Image: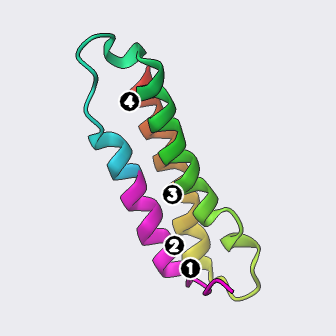
Amino acid sequence: MSRLIPAAERIVRARALIQKARQLPIPSENGRYDFSYIANVKDLLRQARDLIKFISMTPSATVEIKEEVKKIYQEADQAEQEILH
């Protein structure tokens, strides 16, 4: 049985995944248009979104936590725009 990860830790992990996506090295041959690079970036951002997906639906989530979740969604969208476009 997997252990439950608290919301605060999920938020920290999601931010770390977004940062990891930003730090992926751009391939020298095709640059930002390399399919594996695009797939890796999108996968990391998807993992970040999946970590926080259900936090706002839990009854124990405070208003501050819900605001942090919204910020992370915005950060992930912004990171995707900056990295891939």
* Secondary structure character of the magenta stretch overall: helix
Q: In percent of the image, x 66 and y 82: which residue is there?
A: 61
| Amino acid under disc 3 | Lys
**Crowd band around label 1 with a 10 angstrom C-alpha radius: few (<14), some (14–19), many (20+):** many
What amino acid type should be assigned to the residue bearing mark 1? Ala
Q: Are marks 2 and 3 in contact (CB under 8 Å)?
A: no
Give, as a three-letter code, the residue at label 2: Arg
The residue indicated by pointer 4 is 83
Give the mark nearest the N terminus, 3 or 4: 3
Residue 66 drawn at (x, y percent): 61, 71
- Picture colour scheme: rainbow
Residue furthest front as drawn? 1
Q: Label 2, secondary structure: give it.
A: helix
Please, what secondary structure does the residue beneath circle 1 have?
A: helix
List x then y, in percent, for residue 3. Answer: 60, 87
Q: CA distance from mark 4 to mark 2?
A: 23 Å
Chain-order first, disc 3 or disc 1: 1
Q: Say which amino acid is labelled 4.
A: Ile
Quick one: label 2 or label 3, which is nearer the N terminus?
2
* Magenta extent: 1-17
Q: Vertically, is 43 above or below 8?
A: above
Rendered position, 76 above or below 83:
below
* Residue on which disc 1 sits: 7
Q: Which residue is tagged 2?
A: 10
> In whole angstroms, how far apart are the C-alphas of marks 1 and 2?
5 Å
Report the Cα–Cα distance between label 3 and label 1: 14 Å
